[in-house]
Image: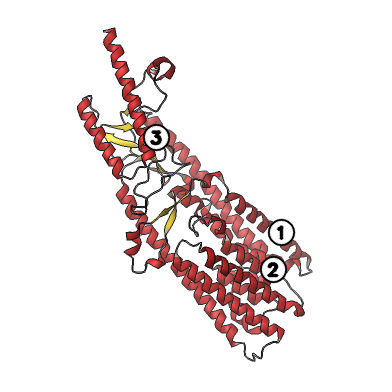
Amino acid sequence: MIDAQSLVALGRSVCAPQALHEATSASQFLLSPFYSLGDYAMVFGNLGLFLLFHGMHRFQLYRRNKTFERTTATLYHNNPPPVAKHSNMHDLNPAASGAVASSPLTMITSLPTTTIMRPAVALKFPNHSISLAMLLAPGVVNGGMRGIFSGEVVDTIGGVVGLVAVSLGVWWRWRSGNLRELKPMRFVLWPHHVRRSFIAPWLLPYGQWGPLSLRSTHGRLRGAVRVGCEWLSAQTITVALLVQAVASIPVPTSWCVGLWFVLCGVQLISVMLIVVVRPARAPATDVLQVISLLITATLELIAGLIASHATAIESESPLTVLSLASMVTSVVKSAHTALIFVWEMQQNNQQQQVIGGGAMEGDDGTIGNITSSNRKGARLLPRQDLRDSPPMVSPRESAWSSQLPSLFLLSPIEEDDDDDDDGLEESSSWRSRMKSGTTPAQLLEELIGAVCALHLEAKKETKVSRWE
């Protein structure tokens, strides 16, 4: 879509040859559905559409938050928090007992069997608003730049408003890329055998950003690039807005040659960045992007030569052919994006079925998912908040099947006072944890917590025996 919008902007330029203008005149609605009403209508119309959608998005989030608060309040009112087995605070006080402060193992009698998805994750806020803003921004820049230089009061005001709005959007995008909430995002590689099982592995991405909750809310800020190339995550929209701004300037006819060569230079610089860095998640994405940029650069070069009268091109048919090729490439890129989306959705669904189990708050933004309803109890392992450091998964393992719950790690056991049965159940739980892909550091922390808990239990029994 962005490539087609850039091509339409070139056709709307005052320096555009007649063949290019005719080839793109029927596609001006891609910039704005209000293009026929004038430049100011493009600016205010696109901004109005964004504000309307974003306002509805925020209102839905507000309503979901209120419903979410009422639901969680009712849930915990009907199912009060479980009472820990170690309820004697004197035994848990490091100063009184002399034990090292740690997170002891506690026994939970019951937990609710309910799954609640966080409102922001369910509504994908602000992901959908970001996508719409990227779709409408080229029309705002095009109409705004043309309006500023038009000499009409209304168009000039619309141009100033449009440039201010785009500047605020650029500032928000730069600020959002450095948000603390995005620091936990990690790029998890797809297993090699999973990609190889597809008929054309080079069409598939190397991995995806996670966890799912952050990908649902801020995936548009990272989703197009792989790890290490975050600084190029906004390259496509940046190049598109530069092309829209430069092509919309109403320069004199004598300056048209320079304008076309400036536009060609922008495209070639972007090509060099892609060839050297290869930022996309999928190899085919880089190839298609380079082809699209080269087609556009060739079109701009030919347009510049025609404007300078330095070539004896009598027919402008090459411009028509290149315009058609650019449109076809844009369609192929959209189809490739859809293929990646469908494939990743299938893989994620399969892995969610494999994961099973439950947690108080998962990486997918759900809260209160306890699937072991037939158990009498569950053992609460030491607290581990994985929001700051999500687990990295080996490429040879399932990308998401080893993810751990965000707030608590639960391993179901039978509530039994028999020490031998409890030890066997605990050892089997640890073996299952090892198979699930838990990192050694996490297992070590849990082991320390278990040892401290056993030490406190033994000390408590010793005190009871002495009292008796």
Which residue in the structure is indicated by mark 2? 39
Q: Nearer the viewer, residue 439 or 84?
A: 439
Q: Which numbered dot is residue 161?
A: 1
Residue 12 is situated, as x and y percent measured from the top left of the image, at 66, 75
- Measure the alpha-carbon separation of dots 3 and 1: 48 Å
Identify the residue at horizontal 60%, vertical 83% (top origin): 319
Compared across the picture, whether 342 is left or right of 331 comes to left
- Measure the alpha-carbon separation of dots 2 and 1: 12 Å
Residue 289 is situated, as x and y percent measured from the top left of the image, at 52, 69
Residue 370 is situated, as x and y percent measured from the top left of the image, at 33, 39
Q: Does 45 appear above or below 446?
A: below
Q: In the image, what residue type sits under mark 1?
A: Val
Compared across the picture, whether 144 is left or right of 431 comes to right
Q: Quadrant of residue 53?
A: bottom right
What quarter of the picture does the C terminus occupy? top left
Q: Does 94 appear above or below 243?
A: above
Q: What element carries label 1?
A: helix
Q: In the image, what residue type sits under mark 3?
A: Leu
First along the sequence among labels 2 and 3 = 2
Compared across the picture, whether 273 is left or right of 397 comes to right
Residue 456 is situated, as x and y percent measured from the top left of the image, at 34, 20
Q: Does 15 appear above or below 369?
A: below
Identify the residue at horizontal 44%, vertical 64% (top origin): 282
Q: Is mark 3 on a helix, strand or loop?
A: helix
Q: Nearer the viewer, residue 152 or 207?
A: 207
Q: Which numbered dot is residue 75?
A: 3
What quarter of the picture does the N terminus occupy? bottom right
Q: Do the residues labelled 2 and 1 touch (CB within 8 Å)?
A: no
**Number of marks:** 3
Identify the residue at horizontal 63%, vertical 55% (top origin): 169
Disc number lying in front (3 or 1): 1
